[in-house]
Amino acid sequence: MSNPVIDLLDLKKYFKEVKAVDGVSLSINQGEIFGLLGPNGAGKTTILNILCTLLKPTSGNAIICGHDINKDKDAVRRCIGIVFQDPSLDDQLTAYENLDLHGRLYHIPKDKRKQKMEELLELVELSDKRNVMVKTFSGGMKRRLEIARGLLHQPEVLFLDEPTLGLDPQTRRHIWEYIEKLNRDTKVTIILTTHYMDEADVLCNRVAIIDRGKISAIDTSTQLKKQIGGEVISIKTEDEFHPDQPWIKNVNKHDGCINLTVEEADQKLSLLMNIAQEKKINIDSVTIHKPTLEDVFLHFTGKTIREEEANWADAVRTRRRSRSR
Ligand SMILES: Nc1ncnc2c1ncn2[C@@H]1O[C@H](COP(=O)(O)OP(=O)(O)OP(=O)(O)O)[C@@H](O)[C@H]1O
Ligand SMILES: [Mg+2]
């Protein structure tokens, strides 16, 4: 049974001509780990900032735990916790002091605050570092402390903006384990943003693919991959190869590869090789794989997430250059 705690209703946020969020509607169920997956500049942080009531939407609305983000900011703020994309701990304070400060800001009574802080330091395995100044912490330890802080006032919903950005693979896995554990133990609903395919794949119950302010697809990662169906044959060739066949379900070209989605790839591969031979196409290599989230992203947006990020970086560089002129 679905039980939505968050409803986004045609949410839009325009910054002058930039349509950062361009009509996003979705529902997130109680207890879900929900991922917003998209490249740099897709609009992920803007969505979170609107849901946290830090930004006013241009139009549209969202209801969080029954409260309207446009009309009832305080009630919304009471039921959410957030871990920002950019680190926001006080480096000159200890782990304990950082948590305590947050608890006081939320007016959590002293005894309750102490008890919660102990529990959470335990949960993120930082109990023995409680009196250590945060400036000596590693990136992963800081992230864990920020997650603990976001949970201190027992929010029903926790927003995590790029929880593992810039962390090494081992630390990222560790953070995933904490996120899963706290979702399991506290039943908190978690909405996270990421541009890591593996993070969305492993951690999230459902994923929304977001590109240029719009949602291109929402489902479990398994279902998203199933929507593509079959298998993907990637053929690397420098020649123009157009194997127009009715059994090819989808075609994408990028990085000097033509990617064909087909059923029964082993059989189709020999047919494709025959066609290539007839057309005198030189093939450098061929691989077959089950669809990945990367293929899903390519299917729905026509680009890989890396290409999107490269385009975005180019656009930013161009803008900077024209400004400096
Ligand atoms: N305060 C602002 N003023 C003007 N433009 C903004 C502002 N905040 C965001 N934008 C623009 O809105 C778009 C979406 O930005 P946003 O930060 O939401 O993307 P994101 O998906 O979180 O990206 P990243 O993965 O890099 O964090 C970008 O084009 C960005 O430049
Ligand atoms: Mg962001």
Image (spheres, rainbow, N blue to C red):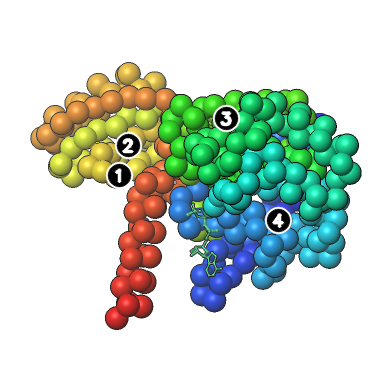
**Which of disc 4 and disc 2 is earlier in sequence?**
4
Q: Nearer the viewer, residue 17 or 166?
A: 166
The three-letter code of the residue at mark 2 reads: Asn
Q: Residues within 10 Å of mark 4 (few under 14, many from 20)?
A: many
Q: CA distance from mark 2 to mark 3?
A: 31 Å
Q: Earlier in the sequence, mark 3 or mark 4?
A: 4
Between disc 1 and disc 3, whose residue precedes? 3
Question: Which of the two labelled residues, at mark 2 and mark 3, occupies the earlier sequence position?
Answer: 3
Whether the residue carrying mark 3 lies under 8 Å from ligand 1 is answered with: no
The Cα–Cα distance between marks 2 and 4, rounded to whole angstroms, is 38 Å
For residue 94, above or below residue 10: above
Q: Is mark 2 within 8 Å of ligand 1?
A: no
The amino acid type, in three-letter code, at marker 3 is Trp
Disc 2 and disc 3 in contact, CB within 8 angstroms: no
State which quadrant residue 213 falls in. bottom right
**Is 235 left or right of 73, judged from the image as shown?**
left
Label located before the other in sequence (1 or 2): 1
Say whether marks 1 and 3 touch (CB < 8 Å): no
